[in-house]
Image (tube, rainbow, N blue to C red):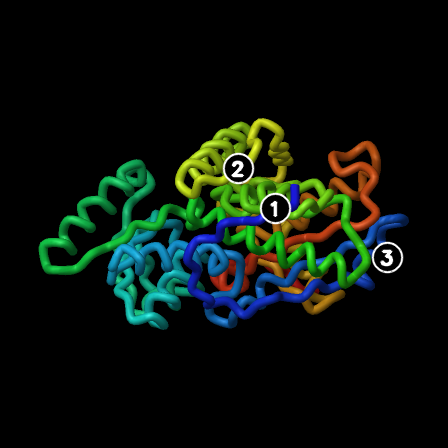
Amino acid sequence: MLQMIKWPARIELAQLPTPITKLERFSKRFKDTTIWVKRDELTGTEVSGNKIRKLEYCIAEAQNQSCDTLITCGGIQSNHCRATAVLGARLGMKVHLILRGEKPDVPEGNLLMDYLCGAQISYLSQAQWRGHEDLAAELQDKYASVGRKAFFIPIGASDEIGLWGYIKASEELKQNFQNLKMEPEYIVTATGSGGTQGGLIVGTELFDIQSQVVAFNVSDDAAYFEKKIREDVMLWKQRYNQEFDEASMKVKTIEGYVGPGYGIAGPEVFDSIAELASSEGIFLDPVYTGKAFHGMVTELQKGDAGQMPGAKNVVFIHTGGLFGVFPQQQNFSFS
C-alpha cells in the first residue's frame, strides 16, 4: 500500500536512524532462525528507547497549541515519564508527572532522572490510579490559573498523535531491510500501552513491508490491545484525514509472558537479560524488553509448533529501558 503520506509536525529530537544488529552468537542456538535487533535504545543516552519517537510528534503538537507545560503519567519507573522529563528540560518546558505508587525514600533509576530534570511529581496509590486523568485535567486548570498552558500526553504517548512515531520508524525499517537485502518474517516488540505496536502495524502496511508484527504484552491482555489499537487507528484516521483500511489489520499479541505482573519479572527474565548481555553486549530491561525477548525466544524454540512458525529472520525492536535495571539489581544472581 505504498502511498504518499501527509505527515504532521514533528520536532527532530532522537538520534536517527538507529542501526540493526545481527545476533551472531545468540542466534546459533536456533537451527534455521537468525535474530536481529533494531537498536532503538540508541535514540539518545538520556532518552534511550522508543518513547522519544512518539514524543517528537506529541511535543510538536503541544508547541503548535502554544503550550509551555507537559503533563503525563505512568509507573514510578516509567521510561516514558523519564523521556518526557528529559525532553522538557531540553526544550525549556515545565513537566509535571503523575506516577502510580508510593513515593520511595530514595529515588532510583528513571525516577532519579525525573527529579534531576526538575520534573514536578504527584504520586497516586494503586487505589487512586483510576482518577489519574481527572487529576491531569485539574492540573491543567491549575496551570491555566497562573498563566501557563499545559498539554496532556497519555500513558506511553500512545494515542493517535504518538502513533506517528512508529509509522515513521517503519519507513526507517524499510530502508534497513533494503540495505540488508533481507525482509524478516516477523517484527517483534514488547507492548504495554499499544502505541509502538499500533504504529508498526499501520507503518508496515503503508510502506508495503510483508513482515508480521508480533507483540508480547507486559500488561493487560490480547483483547485489550486489539481494542486499544483499533480505537487509536480510527482516531488517527479521523484526526489526520488518512486513508487506511483498519478492517484488514492483524493485531497479534502473544500472551503468557507477563509473569507475576506489570513491572515484576520472574527469574527466567533476569536470566535472559544476563544471557544476552554476556553473549552480545546488549542490555534489556525487566519491565518490557526482557519479558518480550524471553517470550520470543521461547516461542522460536517451539519451532512450527509455537506462535511464530516459519521464522527465518526475526527483527526484535529494542525499546530501551536500561535505567529500569538498576532498581531491580537484587534479582540477578551471579555464580
Rendered residue at 44%/46% (across/down): 158
253 over 46 or under it: above or below: above
- Residue type at mark 1 is Gln
Instruction: Compare residues 203 and 119 and report the one nearer the observer.
Output: 203
Is label 3 in contact with label 1 (beta carbons under 8 Å)? no
- Determine whether label 2 and label 1 are within 8 Å by CB: yes
Q: SS for tag 1?
A: loop
Element type where label 2 sits in the image = loop
Which is more N-terminal, label 1 or label 2?
1
> Callout 2, which amino acid?
Glu
Residue at x 12% of width, y 60% of height: 147
Coordinates of residue 61 in the picture (x, y in percent): 35, 55
Give the left or right position of residue 172, taking residue 134 as reference: right
The residue wearing badge 2 is: 243
Horizontal placement of 233 versus 251: left or right? left
Say the numbered circle drawn on residue 326. Answer: none
| Residue of label 1 | 3
Q: Position of residue 311 (x, y in %)?
A: 81, 43
**Label 3 sits on what residue type?**
Lys
